[in-house]
Amino acid sequence: MKPEEPVESVGPKEPEPESESEEEPEPESEPEPEPEPEPETPAGNYVFDGQNKVIKSAYYQDKTSPEGGGYSFWFLAVDPDNIENETSERIWIDIPKEMMGATTVLKGERPYEWRWWIEFMLEGWDKSYVGHGDPGDMGDVKSGLFSTVNYGNGSFTIEAVIVFNDNKTLSLSYTGEMLEWVD
């Protein structure tokens, strides 16, 4: 018997595999458009007599000492660059360091070296409310509470609900960084 010789196939040839160096690069996909930046969420607001206002400026001052002291906070509904005069509506709160990190019901007493304080000056300063923690006297404050947290590096959470003697309520909520007030 005679060994069979290879037979060439007849018909279309299968394409030979291409070498890697001759491969065409895949077309680059279009870069995805970057998402629109989210609008900045205000760090806080306050509501008085049914009117809601966004806090646009917030300041703090650390007045603590080994003997006591506390923190002062100022909140305004205007941008720091647009404060034109001293009569912008503002809220000033003093909190003894011993009240920081807790929710405190406001009382007419002064158990610490520093007393709590709230001053709410309405636009134009024609009307103001002042409350404080003095024995037997809370000024214009009928009842209220403060809840505060100091996260360090000028970042705080401040919650306040204050009912004044005329039964109008001021509610404030702020979480975020504040500018340090320097005398």
Image (cartoon, grey):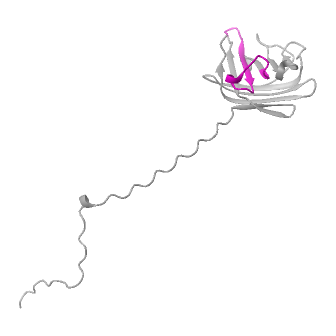
Expressed as whole percent of the image width and height from the top left, the position of residue 80 reads 68, 23
Residue 100 colored in magenta in the image: no
In this orientation, which residue lies closer to the viewer: 72 or 114? 72
Residue 178 drawn at (x, y percent): 66, 24
Where residue 58 appears, x then y in whole percent?
Answer: 70, 24
Q: What residue is drawn where x is 25% and y is 65%?
A: 18
- Left or right of 164, for residue 174: left
**Quadrant in the rendering for residue 129:** top right
Q: Is residue 76 above or below residue 70?
A: below
User: In which quadrant of the rendered view does residue 20 lie?
Assistant: bottom left
User: Was residue 76 drawn as part of the magenta stretch in this picture?
Assistant: yes
Which of these two is toward me, 93 or 26? 26
Residue located 45% across and 53% down the image:
30
Q: Locate residue 116, reporting x and y percent.
A: 79, 17
Horizontal side of residue 15 vs 100, given as left or right: left
Task: Report the magenta residues as a range.
Answer: 65-91
Quadrant location of the C terminus in the rendered image: top right
